[in-house]
Image (spheres, rainbow, N blue to C red):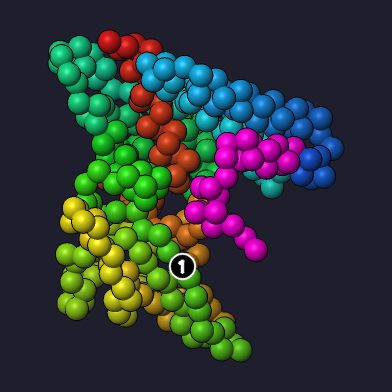
Amino acid sequence: MTPTYWDMERRGSAESWRRLRQYRSVLLDMTADDDLQSLFATGLHQAEQQFKAATTIGPESRPLNLFYGLSQAGRAIAVAASLSRATLARLDGHGITCRDLQNFRKHRVPDLSTLVVRSRDSQDASFPVLSKILESQDLSSAINLGQLWEVLVEPQLHEPLIALQNPVLLARADELLGPEGSGTKFLYLDGIPASEDFNDPVSFANFAASYPSLAGSTFDRVTGHSSVRDGRSDTQSIQVSWTVSSGGSSGATDSIGIYRQSLFVLPAPPGGDRPMHPLMIWWAVLFGLSMLARYEPT
């Protein structure tokens, strides 16, 4: 049985790394290229070392280890992706920059959420290359850490700080298709603000406009409600659907993101036309925090 997000969440870090290390043997079965095997194994090993080191130090320096751990994991991902491509993406540089760091010196207690990051126009750098591999929205338009934090999966599922207008949505898919492939595809979405009233088709269309993966879908019904005592996180669950023509595809659920073995629907970032992959959201957040830790530690 395939584990879900919550199954994977219950694993300890040691078990998670053990499972990741298994991919080294998988790569051996896929290629006899010694360079690829070495790059993959080294990237994965360095990532594990950096993440483990981050657990032994304080928050003042931790973002540095976490970011470089993720960066090395990205190199392993690029190697794995090259097996289905003509050439290996040899990553050169971060491909992302942090703007207006000097402005943080002007504030005694700076607002971290206002720190702005954006991707660089570099074909060989880590951020744009991995964004392309993972079919993630790039950051050609500047975005701040507060906006990125709002579309991170883990904080929104575990410790949402505020009720968001366009939150991360946990999803389940189903379909009723005939022998010719025609029929209906369904998606069940959890975490929608209870304040949303979709009885008006225009209201659902306006809400869905922030989620590229929901393009062409129709609101069917509310399937449940969830409430917490403070009232900030009252949510509803809904069912949406797409009609699939005979022998064709609606595209429904094909573009829904899979993260930690579960389906998620994420809003597009400001200025974007598709969601960012959760790995790339973490990449941008940790890059910004690592720049602060390095150049503005006080």
Image quarter (top left, top right, bottom left or bottom right) of the C terminus: top left
Residue at the location (61% across, 23% down)?
A: 49
Q: Position of residue 85 (x, y in %)?
A: 67, 44
Q: Is residue 151 visible?
A: no
Residue 98 location in percent, x, y? Answer: 33, 23
The residue identified by callout 1 is 172
In the rendered image, residue 58, in percent from the top left (x then y), is placed at 42, 17
Q: Quadrant of residue 27?
A: top right
Q: Residue furthest front?
A: 229
Residue at (35% x, 43% y) in the render: 155
| Secondary structure found at label 1 | strand
Residue 114 in view of the camera: yes
Asked if residue 175 is positioned above or below residue 69 in the image, the reply reads: below
Q: Is residue 240 above or below residue 65?
A: below
* Pointer 1 local density, CA inside 10 Å: few below 14, some 14–19, many at least 20: some
Between 53 and 204, the one lying in front of the other is: 53
Q: Residue at position x 50%, y 79% from top?
A: 175
Between residues 84 and 13, which one lies in front from this camera angle? 13
Q: Residue at x 24, y 58 (%)?
A: 228
Give the quadrant of the N terminus. Answer: bottom right
Amino acid type, residue under disc 1 in the picture? Arg
Q: Main secondary structure of the magenta part?
A: helix
Left or right position of 215 against 100: right
Tag count:
1
* Image height of 232 relative to 104, above or below: below
Query: Residue 122, how many percent across, how many down?
Result: 47, 28
Task: List the single residue furthest toward the bottom.
Answer: 179
Horizontally, residue 159 falls left or right of residue 88, namely left
Is residue 147 magenta-colored? no
Q: Which residues are magenta?
A: 1-24
